[in-house]
């Protein structure tokens, strides 16, 4: 068996920004996919119900209908531990059809660095 097998590029640790956060365990190159996570896409009605709970701080925007009713999704996996920064070092892409969210490095990320994403227009609601 080879030595130094890396089980994961990421881990959850205490964050200086906000409770827990997601950290790189190895150096990650800009553009590299960190992970792809499954989504549970909520209906417009369920999204509205979740909006009134703490769980809403952890959802991802999927889309909205012609009347402006939004659908959100709950991601399963460590991406839910990503904290917000307008100067994020990682990016995410929601694929509603595939029901996944992909987390990628937006720049080179050194081992030990917290992985941060920009919550975009939802930052004020989520923080």
Image: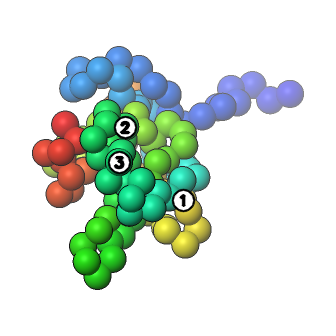
Of callouts 2 and 3, the N-terminal one: 3
Image mark for residue 26: none
Element at label 2: helix
Q: Is residue 84 left or right of residue 96?
A: left
Q: Residue furthest left?
A: 124
Of callouts 1 and 3, the N-terminal one: 3
Element at label 3: helix
Residue at image mark 3: 49
* Label 1 – label 2 distance at C-alpha: 18 Å
Element at label 1: strand
* Callout 2 touching callout 3 (CB < 8 Å): no
Pick the quarter of the image with the C terminus.
top left
Q: Nearer the viewer, mark 2 or mark 3?
A: 3
Residue 67 in the image, given as x and y percentages of width and height:
25, 77
Give the answer, above or below, for where 76 lies relative to 8: below
Q: Nearer the viewer, mark 1 or mark 3?
A: 3
Residue 56 in the image, given as x and y percentages of width and height:
32, 43
Q: Is residue 90 left or right of residue 37?
A: left
* Label 2 – label 3 distance at C-alpha: 10 Å
Residue at image mark 2: 55
Of callouts 1 and 2, the N-terminal one: 2
| Residue 111 visible within the image | no
* Callout 1 touching callout 3 (CB < 8 Å): no
Q: Residues within 10 Å of mark 3 (few under 14, many from 20)?
A: few
Give the answer, above or below, for where 45 lies relative to 97: above
Q: Residue furthest top?
A: 14
Residue at image mark 1: 100
Q: Residue at x 29, y 20 (%)?
A: 19
Q: Is residue 107 left or right of residue 16?
A: right
Foreground: 69 or 78? Answer: 69
């Amino acid at each position: 068996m080879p030595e130094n097998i890396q089980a994961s590029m990421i881990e959850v640790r205490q964050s200086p920004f906000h409770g827990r956060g997601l950290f790189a365990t190895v150096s990650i190159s800009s553009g590299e996919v960190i992970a792809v996570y499954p989504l549970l896409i909520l209906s417009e009605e369920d999204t509205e119900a979740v909006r009134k709970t703490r769980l809403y701080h952890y959802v991802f925007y999927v889309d909205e209908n012609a009347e402006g009713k939004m659908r959100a999704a709950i991601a399963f996996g460590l991406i839910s531990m990503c904290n917000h920064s307008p100067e994020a070092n990682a990016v995410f892409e929601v694929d509603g059809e595939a029901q996944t969210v992909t987390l990628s490095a937006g720049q080179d990320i050194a081992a030990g660095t917290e992985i941060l994403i920009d919550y975009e227009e939802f930052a004020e609601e989520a923080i």
